[in-house]
Each structure stands twice: as structure tokens, then as C-alpha cells.
Image (tube, rainbow, N blue to C red):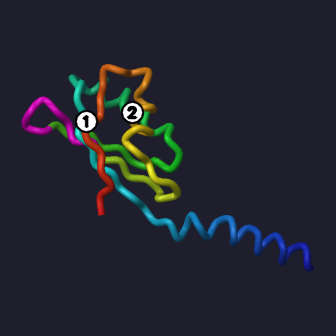
Amino acid sequence: MKLLQIIQIVAILCIAPLAMAGETSYIGKLTGVECTACKKTIAQALSKIDGVQTIRIVKNKDETHRLEVLTDGSKAITKADANKALEKAEHYQIQSWSKSS
């Protein structure tokens, strides 16, 4: 019985920080996107970052795209993290990056 209680406590302690973190979203300005295949490539690359749940790419009026990344909030994602994920697809560049409230 004691072992089961210890396992339950450990499980709660491991899961609690994730549950308390909450979702976090980031907004970026992206260049180099020319087609739907580009969007798919970017989404696949960024989805490999731990915690990323949803990626949305929307064309702005100029030649840039708005990048919205929703995460589980378990860790902060920097512009450098996002650009590193796109490293193999260097045609795309994140020009700006901010945490959305």
C-alpha cells in the first residue's frame, strides 16, 4: 500500500508543473514563404520543438507571413530556438518573435 501511495505522489509531482504551466503562444514575422508546401515544411520543422502544439501561418499584405505558434507552456521558446528548427530550411527566416499574452 505504501508503494502505491509513493508512486501516486511522484506522478502528481511530475505532472503538476506541466498542468500549471498553461498554454503559451508566440507571434512571429516570417519571410521566404512562397507556397503551401513551404508552410508544410515550416510547420514540420517547428513542430519538432518540445511543447509545440499548433502552428498557423497566415499571409500578410506585404511579402511576409504571420507565424503563430501555440505551445503547452512547458518551456519558453526563443527566436533562436525557432530559427534553429528551420536551420535545414534556411530559405525561411523569422524576422521578429514575441510571446503573446
Query: How many labels were placed on the picture?
Result: 2
Type of amino acid at the residue the image marks with label 1: Gln
Reply above or below: 22 against 45.
below
Between the C-alphas of marks 2 and 1, the distance is 9 Å
**Picture disc at residue 95:** 1
Type of amino acid at the residue the image marks with label 2: Asn
Reply above or below: 101 against 36.
below
Instruction: Tell whether label 1 touches label 2 (CB within 8 Å).
Output: no
- Would you identify the image quadrant in which residue 43 lies? top left
Q: Residue drawn 45% across and 39% down? A: 47
Residue numbers of the magenta segment: 60-67
Sequence-first disc among 2 and 1? 2
- Would you identify the image quadrant in which residue 86 lies? top left
**Picture disc at residue 63:** none
**Picture disc at residue 83:** 2
Determine whether, in the image, residue 47 is placed left or right of residue 96: right
Determine whether, in the image, residue 16 is placed left or right of residue 50: right
Q: Residue drawn 43% across and 48% down? A: 77
Q: Residue drawn 52% across and 70% down? A: 20
Q: Secondary structure at mark 2?
A: helix
